[in-house]
């Protein structure tokens, strides 16, 4: 009954807005404009409105003015045209932002009326934020500062629409996280969960916990030396990220994962490690474990300006051993303790679903607790609903990306998700749409195989299409009307976000991006980089180059004419150095081509392939697999015996850097950069 009343209210709003527009001939009525996510309601009128470049603010709200200024900036980034923030009565082509209560729109919905001017109306700043994204996307898609006339009523079907990124096993630079916020906001995604600590798998590190990769990525003053040395965030950087996200309607949920996945903590304080279940498990029977974790949470939740600013904090609690009943009961006690611990700071606790796996007698608080349901064997969602948890659909079999691992998804099955999935599907369980127990849905990137050569650019190449798809289905649910083929074709015509081009795409068709008759040492090309699929061709009149001589560099990568170690042609990104078995020939002139896609980087000389750097399989070698031979007085011979079940697919990809040329001695001419989309 409530849903029927709500839809009736939406229809009344839609009709009221439509009646304000000029009468339209049926055959000329504008179809629903393409946006991601799709508009939930649209009534087209006739004609197009050219935007004046003015946005009118109808109140003295500081938040509304801030939104208007951000909108103006991003309008210029998308359209190339200036927008000014003004007050007063709207004129033809102006956009008006109005905050006014409207129960039918909820907390995030909005109404957009396009007639002689544009009216964006919502009950909250966040609703208006999403309305401005719709305006930007329509202009983006059409390549013009104009909107089709009509009325949209756009209300999300699920309140939580998100993404989780594993920064523990692979450092994700803050610059990327900030761009990720921009992209999420552009597609009306409102939740970014940042997994701040984790560790690799010990079989890839000689079966030695002490040598196994582990990291805690946040500045820590309580425990000096805990913070990762290979990449971390200062407290101020993390606070600033949250503030920036808040301005764009995105909530950052920080996650400190324990009592499993806790090797970073036991590396720092070995006495906290479980002697029975492995050093990545905290010892739940050791009182020092609680003292350590209490103090860690205190550091980020306490003070006048807490480092964790948002209303929610994730306490982890996934994949701890359930081998013994007393262990299960201790795990449940630990989970309950940290739910209540973050609550005493006024935060809502978020946990990974584990209470079917850890079924026991010790009570664990469920009221006002959010549970990420990732695998039904660990947390049976119907049981968790009955216990009172609010559920987030983040099923491993549908929405986990583990780059180049050979299990789970490397790229999500976006077509299946678009056609068949909504957050009401959690693993094999299907709930009613809009079940109040289900807050929404998320997808995740887990960087399980630490050291596998995957770059942040490779991660993003996997994230972006998944993000658009999950954004569509968490906002629109079952209300999508566009066939997947049309959705897929049209979405690539949008920018990733205003001012963001992490994929380093130029246009949507194959083209020549850049041509230079000669590359001067130390010069800049005007392009940051070129993304997959591409070719970069140049002619080199070779001279002897010192090791470490750069051809091109960007903030993300370096391409060497002579790499720092062997003087070969090669490249470095994300700390990984990859080389071709090729040196620039002294005294000869050759034409070289570098071709790259999301699987390999290839070198051609004078049009002939010299080498392709594709995925390289690295097998585990275990001491107990070695075969020992003694041949008379000869030295011990130990052939390596590989374990075929444990392997990493090392990636040697490159988003080619272009921003600035290095200080080389060779003459480099006829540069041609081509995009092969």
Image: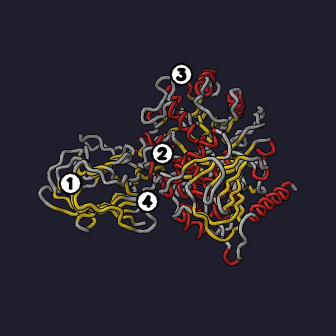
Reading the chain from its start, which is encountered first: label 4 or label 3?
A: 3
Q: Which mark is residue 583?
A: 1
Residue contact between numbered discs 4 and 3, judged by CB atoms under 8 Å: no
Spatial distance from mark 4 to mark 3, Cα to Cα? 43 Å
Reading the chain from its start, which is encountered first: label 4 or label 2?
A: 2
For marks 4 and 3, give the one nearer the viewer.
Answer: 4
Q: Residue furthest left?
A: 587
Local crowd size for mark 2, using a 10 Å CA cut-off: few (<14), some (14–19), many (≥20): some
Q: Which mark is residue 570?
A: none
Spatial distance from mark 1 to mark 2, Cα to Cα? 33 Å
- List the residue tagged with mark 2: 176
Front residue of this view, candidates 422 and 328: 422
User: From where the camera sits, is residue 333 visible?
Assistant: no
Q: Is mark 3 on a helix, strand or loop?
A: loop
Reading the chain from its start, which is encountered first: label 1 or label 2?
A: 2
Q: Please state, as top left, top right, bottom left or bottom right, where the N terminus lies in the image.
A: bottom right
For marks 1 and 4, give the one nearer the viewer.
Answer: 4
Give the x, y percent position of residue 140.
53, 60
Give the x, y percent position of residue 545.
17, 48
Spatial distance from mark 3 to mark 2, Cα to Cα? 27 Å
Give the x, y percent position of residue 270.
51, 25
Please identify the quarter of the rendering in which residue 542 is found: bottom left
Local crowd size for mark 4, using a 10 Å CA cut-off: few (<14), some (14–19), many (≥20): many
Residue contact between numbered discs 1 and 4, judged by CB atoms under 8 Å: no
Local crowd size for mark 3, using a 10 Å CA cut-off: few (<14), some (14–19), many (≥20): few
Spatial distance from mark 1 to mark 4, Cα to Cα? 30 Å
**What's the residue at 52%, 63% (across, down)?**
144
- List the residue tagged with mark 3: 222
Q: What element carries label 1?
A: loop
In this rendering, would 5 be left or right of 489? Answer: right
């Amino acid at each position: 009954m409530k849903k029927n009343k709500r839809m009736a209210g939406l229809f009344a709003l839609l009709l009221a807005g439509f009646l304000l527009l000029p009468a339209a001939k049926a055959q000329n009525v504008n179809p629903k404009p393409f946006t991601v996510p799709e508009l939930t309601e649209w009534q087209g009128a006739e004609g197009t409105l050219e935007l004046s470049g003015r946005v009118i603010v109808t109140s003295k709200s500081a938040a509304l003015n801030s939104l208007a200024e951000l909108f103006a900036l991003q309008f210029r980034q998308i359209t190339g045209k200036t927008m000014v923030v003004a007050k007063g009565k709207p004129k033809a082509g102006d956009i008006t932002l109005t905050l006014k209560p409207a129960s039918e729109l909820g907390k995030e919905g909005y109404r957009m009326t396009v007639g002689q001017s544009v009216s964006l109306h919502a009950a909250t700043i966040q609703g208006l934020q999403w309305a401005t994204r719709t305006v930007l996307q329509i202009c983006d898609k059409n390549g013009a500062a104009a909107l089709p006339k009509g009325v949209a009523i756009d209300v999300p079907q699920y309140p939580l629409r998100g993404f989780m990124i594993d920064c523990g096993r692979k450092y994700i630079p803050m610059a990327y996280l900030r761009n990720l916020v921009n992209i999420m906001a552009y597609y009306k995604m409102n939740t970014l969960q940042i997994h701040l600590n984790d560790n690799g798998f010990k079989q890839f590190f000689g079966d030695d916990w002490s040598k196994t990769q582990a990291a805690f990525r946040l500045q820590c003053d309580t425990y000096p030396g805990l913070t990762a040395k290979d990449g971390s965030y200062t407290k101020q950087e993390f606070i600033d990220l949250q503030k920036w996200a808040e301005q764009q309607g995105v909530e950052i949920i920080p996650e400190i994962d324990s009592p499993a996945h806790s090797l970073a903590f036991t590396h720092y304080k070995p006495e906290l490690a479980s002697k029975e279940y492995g050093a990545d498990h905290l010892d739940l029977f050791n009182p020092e474990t609680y003292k350590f974790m209490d103090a860690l949470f205190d550091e980020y939740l306490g003070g006048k300006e807490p480092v964790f600013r948002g209303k929610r904090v994730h306490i982890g609690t996934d994949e701890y051993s359930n081998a013994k009943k007393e262990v299960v009961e201790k795990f449940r006690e630990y989970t309950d303790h940290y739910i209540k611990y973050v609550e005493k700071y006024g935060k809502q606790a978020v946990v990974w679903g584990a209470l079917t796996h850890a079924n026991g007698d010790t009570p664990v608080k469920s009221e006002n607790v959010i549970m990420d349901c990732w695998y039904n064997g660990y947390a049976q969602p119907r049981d968790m609903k009955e216990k009172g948890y609010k559920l987030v659909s983040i099923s491993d079999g549908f929405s986990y990306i583990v780059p180049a691992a050979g299990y789970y998804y490397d790229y999500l099955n976006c077509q299946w998700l678009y056609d068949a999935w909504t957050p009401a599907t959690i693993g094999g369980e299907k709930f009613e749409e809009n079940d109040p127990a289900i807050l929404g849905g998320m997808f995740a990137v887990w960087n399980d195989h630490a050291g596998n050569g995957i770059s942040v650019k490779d991660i993003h190449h996997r994230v972006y299409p998944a993000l658009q798809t999950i954004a569509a289905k968490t906002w629109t649910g079952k209300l999508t009307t566009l066939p997947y083929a049309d959705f897929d074709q049209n979405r690539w015509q949008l920018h990733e976000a205003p001012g963001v081009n992490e994929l380093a795409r130029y246009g949507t068709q194959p083209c020549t991006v850049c041509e230079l008759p000669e590359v001067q040492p130390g010069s800049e090309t005007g392009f940051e980089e070129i993304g997959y699929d591409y070719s970069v061709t140049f002619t080199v009149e070779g001279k002897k180059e010192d090791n470490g001589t750069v051809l091109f560099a960007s903030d993300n990568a370096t391409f060497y004419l002579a790499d720092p170690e062997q003087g070969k042609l090669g490249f470095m990104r994300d700390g990984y150095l990859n080389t071709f078995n090729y040196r620039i020939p002294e005294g000869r002139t050759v034409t070289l081509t570098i071709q790259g896609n999301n699987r390999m980087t290839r070198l051609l000389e004078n049009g002939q392939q010299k080498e392709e750097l594709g995925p390289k399989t690295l097998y585990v070698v275990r001491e107990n697999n070695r075969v020992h031979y003694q041949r008379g007085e000869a030295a011990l011979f130990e052939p390596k015996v590989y374990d075929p079940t444990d392997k990493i697919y090392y990636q040697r990809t490159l988003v080619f850097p272009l921003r600035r040329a290095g200080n080389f001695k060779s003459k480099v001419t006829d540069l041609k950069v081509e995009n092969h989309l």
